[in-house]
Amino acid sequence: MASVTSRLWPGRCYASRVTAAPPALLVRAARAEDEPFLWCMLATTAILPPAESPSVDRVQADPGIAPYLAGWGRPGDAGLVAELDGEPAGAAWYRLYDANHPGYGFVDQDIPEISIGVEASRRGRGVGRALLEALVARARAERHRALSLSVDRRNAPALALYRSIGFEEVGGSAENPTMLLRLVG
């Protein structure tokens, strides 16, 4: 069986494990040492394929994107990492914003906004769905009334996933709708 180990270097993510057997998927809570991988996953969301994702350094310096992870671990932050065969494949997290410093999918200061990224080589294998379903379950357990997100309308697979989970468009722009999933009421 051929394999290439996934490597995480500061400012860059690349490669992935290649196996002949079906991969084993595990979703676990994000840990402090996962922060570099979360930054890599945030970079994957910064631009649509087939364009190459920006470097982590560039994402960390971008005032529109960096707030999605800057100061990770503050109250209200919750995250998950998906692993395929023991290697990180994707991550999803949410955090709370206030009206003075909103995210692109901001709805209300007590509604967490989701970010989700899956390594390009791992897409289409259920990683995003597993992460999103687990994150929704966590938000319900933490008694959040809803979750929000912003998505580029050209990202048809993401839109389809969000709609299948129950997210509905509630605002934003024609190109980047804000979506909301009501968890109670």
Image (spheres, helix red, strand yellow):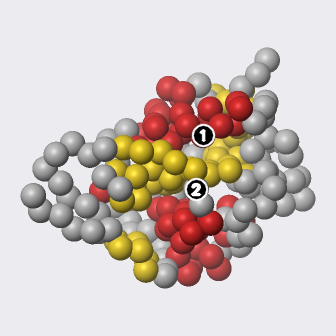
Q: Nearer the viewer, residue 166 or 170?
A: 166
- Amino acid type of the residue that numbered disc 1 sits on in the rendered structure: Leu
Residue that appears at 90% across and 59% down: 100
Residue that appears at 65% across and 79% down: 61
Q: Which type of secondary structure does the marked residue at label 1 adopt?
A: helix
Compared with residue 14, is residue 95 higher up or lower down, i.e. above or below?
above
Compared with residue 179, is residue 51 higher up or lower down, i.e. above or below?
below
Q: Mark 2 sits on what residue?
A: 30
Marks 2 and 1, how far apart at CA: 11 Å
Task: Where is residue 130? Give x, y as percent.
Answer: 46, 38
- Amino acid type of the residue that numbered disc 2 sits on in the rendered structure: Ala
* Res. 24 visible in picture: yes
Left or right of 163, for residue 16: left
Task: Where is residue 160? Give x, y as percent.
Answer: 46, 33
Q: Spot the residue most to the right.
A: 100
Compared with residue 28, is residue 54 higher up or lower down, i.e. above or below?
below
Residue that appears at 45% across and 50% down: 82
Q: Give the class, few, some or many, for how many residues have Cα within 10 Å of label 1's Cα (few <14, many ≥20).
A: many
Left or right of 43, for residue 106: right
- On-image quarter of the N terminus: bottom left
Residue mark closest to the camera, 2 vs 1: 2
* Res. 178 visible in picture: no
Q: Earlier in the sequence, mark 2 or mark 1?
A: 2
Left or right of 46, for residue 17: left
Res 30 quadrant in image = bottom right
The label on residue 170 is none
Q: Spot the residue most to the top.
A: 185
Circles 2 and 1 in contact, beta carbons < 8 Å? no
Q: Mark 1 sits on what residue?
A: 135
Q: Which type of secondary structure does the marked residue at label 2 adopt?
A: loop
Task: Where is residue 123? Give x, y as percent.
Answer: 35, 48
